[in-house]
Image (spheres, rainbow, N blue to C red):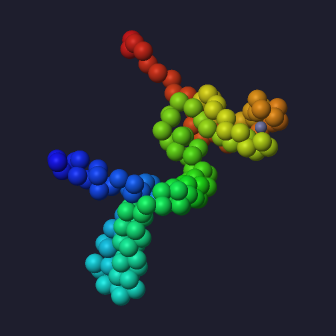
Amino acid sequence: MKINAKIQKFMNGKYGPDQLYILLIILYFILFFINLFINSYIISIIEIIIVFITFYRFFSKNIYKRSKENQKYLRIKNKITKPFFNVKRNYKDKNHIYKKCHHCKTTLKLPLPNKRGIKHVICPECKKRNTILVLKKQKIKVIKKH
Ligand SMILES: [Zn+2]
């Protein structure tokens, strides 16, 4: 039997890695790194607990329960990162503005205006007026120099 097949047979019916697994590993390394400097007894214990949970979840045969835990984690993660979605979008896309409608919370993608400052937009979803502060503006591009 090849090594891959052996691993596969061993992992058969076991849960394996997921997003929560990755978080636990990252957490472990952060604590490990911090502890190199402060050498805390409590952090060492937390590290051991994290390793135990990580291994326990990885080799667990209760796949239903483990994936429930992972879903719970993803929901919490989503709740925490959600307010930053538009910040990320605005950073990545230099040609549009992403804003949430104040009334219905729909995310709007707006074209860049010619001037910075206060703008009024009508939300296509709820037809209500939004006042937004715009810090990005259109840049005039030079196609051919004189
Ligand atoms: Zn709206």
x 38%, y 83%: residue: 45
> Can residue 26 be seen from the camera position used here?
no
Tell which quarter ligand 1 is in: top right
- Taking 133 as reference, is 71 above or below it? below
x 57%, y 32%: residue: 96
> Can residue 45 be seen from the camera position used here?
yes
State the residue in front, 62 or 25.
62
State the residue in front, 55 or 96.
55
x 44%, y 19%: residue: 142
> Which residue, as the protein is rendered here, is positioned at the far bottom?
41
Image location of residue 99, percent across then percent down: 65, 40
Image location of residue 112, percent across then percent down: 60, 29
Image location of residue 26, percent across then percent down: 37, 63
- Taking 120 as reference, is 23 above or below it? below
Give the total of numbered labels. Answer: 0
- Taking 39 as reference, is 122 above or below it? above
x 32%, y 79%: residue: 35
Image location of residue 8, percent across then percent down: 29, 50
Give the image quarter of residue 121: top right
State the residue in front, 145 or 47.
47
Instruction: Pick the quarter of the image with the C terminus.
Output: top left
- Taking 57 as reference, is 125 above or below it? above
